[in-house]
Image: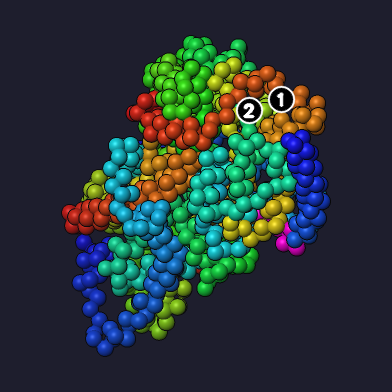
Amino acid sequence: MKSGKFWAWVVFALGAAYFFIPLIATVEFSLRMRRGAYSFDAYQIVLGDPRFQATFGYSVLAAVCTIILGVLIVVPAAYWIRLRLPQLRPVVEFITLLPLVIPAIVIVFGYIRMYGSNSPLPFLASDMGTNALLVIGYAMLALPYMYRAVDTGLRTIDVRTLTEAAQILGAGWGTIIGRVILPNVLIAVLSGAFLTFAIVIGEFTMASLLNRPAFGPYLQNVGANRAYEPAALAIIAFAITWGCMSLIQILSRFAPRSANRPN
Amino acid sequence: MTDLSLSDHAVAGKTAPPAEARSLRLPTQWLGVAPFFLFAIMFLILPTLYLMLGAFQNDAGEFTLENIAALAQPSIVSAYWISIKVSLASSLIGAFAGLAIAIAIVRGGLPEWIRSATLTFSGVASNFAGVPLAFAFIATLGRLGLATVILNTLFGLNIYAHGFNILSFWGLTLTYVYFQIPLMVVIIVPAIDGLKKEWGEAAATLGATMAQYWRMVVIPVIWPSFLGTVILLFANAFGAIATAYALTGSSLNIVPILLYAQIRGDVLHNAHLGYAIAFGMIVITGLANVFYIWFRTRSERWLK
Amino acid sequence: MFKFTGKVLSLSAATLMVSSVISSAASMDDLVKAAKAEGQLTTIALPHDWCGYGDVIAGFKAKYPEITVNELNPDAGSGDEVEAIKANKDNKGPQAPDVIDVGLSFGPTAKADGLIQPYKVSTWDSIPDSAKDADGYWTGDYYGVLSFLVNKDLVKESPADWADLLKPEFANTVALAGDPRASNQAIQAVYAAGLSGGAAAGEAAGTAGLDFFKKLNAAGNFVPVIGKPATLAQGQTPILVTWDYNALAGRDTLKGNPPVDVVVPKTGVVAGVYVQAISAYAPHPNAAKLWLEYLYSDEGQIGWLKGYCHPIRFNDLAKNGKLPADVMAKLPPAEAYTAAVFPTLDEQGKSKEAITKNWDAVVGANVK
């Protein structure tokens, strides 16, 4: 076991080095804005921009909505497929891989054509409608990750036994999924939530083409012709997103305990 | 050994509800997956059908196979090939490295805060791609990158003189791995979490060595999830464009760059060819998915 | 008799001009009213750093505060703008662009696809014929020439011409600002290199340009990264081939850190023209027309000049002495522009074909 711990540290150290060195290099470059001396000028410029807070706030809200929508769509589907409809699994897995290879720009152009102001489902006719369409689009983009995470989580619990036990005790399907299954796969759902959050914060194409004031277009705008500010912005975005996720992580500690999460 | 994996085989064998109950239950399970399919059809499949149709049309709107035929051009074929190679390399490297890190933080006896910090960091890093990532690697391993300069001045090691170049296939793979590893870590940690302590204790009680425990308990349990994540990593790399574009823009010919050149470019702008290229990508992803399912079924049988 | 006819003709021409001035003034008021009634203008692909668009848009907003300007995707390329019009044919929401600003070759193709509508601005006659569509579907708005942006921290002596770039002291320095298989800027750079070598305009210059870059790559001077001010400052791409207005704007943002040089090459000076057009499906056509009127007024044109672009009515403004001296002082010397070549649509088309198809094969900056 001792050697196990040693190797764990080695692996962790190597991983940490690989991930932090490029970030350090970016920070080093962003500090070079003032000639001849390291300074936080680039950071001051970025943080002082009122659009930074506005767009970031918008994207955080969109991310939370996307996570909720994603959970509502994916968890029941993954559960039923695991339990009763295994023959649908290949179809569903293929569908969940599609958002990765279909360019977001194609999906958005499809939305504009199908849900424009003249269509039977005019999402784009109003601000709230467009926001809703954006959240749905994000949920589609995050589908691969959310599904894979939830599916992995469902594998680790005995879905059949839990379901049958809950049914014997008289639970309806809503209770089963909401109060029995979901708490047990919370870690996996949390993983999916992290990935969704990161995707939504950085997403550019959909927000830009649907003309929404999100963080992605703002990032792109600043990065276009500046030299030092984009590096500072990348680091700030990274740090803040990491902070938000840690917050989600901490809040999840207050979730109901389950056999799968004894701590 | 208890059948812990809910493979198709197991479930199909055990669920055969009585006839009347089946007709009562049928609506519920289809209702359960209905939202998923409804959303997928309305917001994923239908909007991209325009692209599928566009692949088979020309500018005049007539049906034609010339766009598909145009995919056989050497430049496009080599682009697909390089894309597949980069995706395979980065997904395999990312998968195994990610697995190692995941095992290290969950089972390695490391302090608790390392696990949560790594998980949240991985969540962010899995989406750190595009221009910021490419720039970070240029700033690290470019000719005037921080690491290059430090290695040169402090250790006298000029990596460029030894043939290293960040603007190359392996440079691009190295950069891709930056978001592949975290993706693997985030997804596989719950699976490793699911390895109950009791199993390890039971195995030890029965006299199994560490190696046997890993080979007969851990790997079979994690294998399906691992494989599923590998294909996710593959598709993730296959569809990634922003990073490649920013890093090796005009020197590396990968499929998403070609696709974007046709759909978005200032110059080429044959949108139908772009749609055909995207159609080809979907086909390849489908084939990869088929291969994954075949491989998983076979290996699950072998692992039992 | 001819003298008499001449007098009559010139008199009637004068009357026509006066009446058209009067009628255009009246119609201008109508246009302003109609545009204000629409209340919004949606633009696309106008980065604030590009040709000083930030200030131009601000100027428009200050002049017509009742019209809000909704700016879509500033990162869009010309292809994106055309696709946006196509996608939004049935959508009158804020995602649909009213006006587009695209590369020269996109004008005729957009017209052929029925995506734009004609409008002749009041200053129509002072715009050179080669830079506008005869029916008014698209109008050239500004141009710039290709130049070298040089990081003086890393490059001691700036190159003066294309041939200089091949010298050994410029190893690992030269980069294009786009992908030569897709970006107009990069393709024109290859074309310019070809022209500088003495090749004939059109396809020959395209092929010659490819040969030049092949030599550049073989000499180890070419860096196949898409260059930006960030990569220039970081050191990966110390010499960047880009439009002069982008280079000058980059010089401004870098503020001397690092100090840069903007060099217009002695030979192979290629001018790239961009054109304005109104979308045929524009939700706010009158606001779009008012926008065009503003852009082609003296105020708009000088706004672009302040952004280091040469407005299309440059010669007209110069003739009437309307060019502010302080703005002119910031641009490269005027002699550099005397050798500027304006490729025709035909030449552009043929060279584009040659360059995009053969870049991978000839230059082979392909990655192993």
Pointer 2 residue: C244
Q: Is residue C279 left or right of residue B210?
A: right
Residue B96: x %, y % from top left: 34, 42
> Among all residues in the image, which is located at the extreme bottom?
B20
Question: Is any part of residue C158 visible from this angle?
Answer: yes
Query: In the picture shown, does residue A117 fall above or below B248?
Result: below
Query: In the picture shown, does residue C156 fall above or below A13?
Result: above
Q: Which color scheme does this rendered protein use? A: rainbow
Q: Chain of mark 2?
A: C
Residue at (30%, 71%) from the top-left corner? A85
Residue B184: x %, y % from top left: 40, 48
Pointer 1 residue: C331
Residue C100: x %, y % from top left: 61, 48
Q: Is residue C111 left or right of residue B98?
A: right
Residue at (35%, 28%) from the top-left corner? C361
* Residue C367 is inside the magenta segment: no
**Quadrant into which the N terminus of chain C falls:** top right
SS of the residue at dot 2? helix
Residue at (80%, 46%) from the top-left corner? C15
Q: Which residues are magenta?
A: C35-42
Instruction: Identify the amino acid type marked 1.
Output: Leu
> Among all residues in the image, which is located at the extreme left?
B302
Q: Residues within 10 Å of mark 2 (few under 14, many from 20)?
A: many
The answer to the question of whether label 1 and label 2 lie on touching residues, with beta carbons closer than 8 A, is yes
Q: Return the residue nearer the eye: C271 or B276.
A: C271
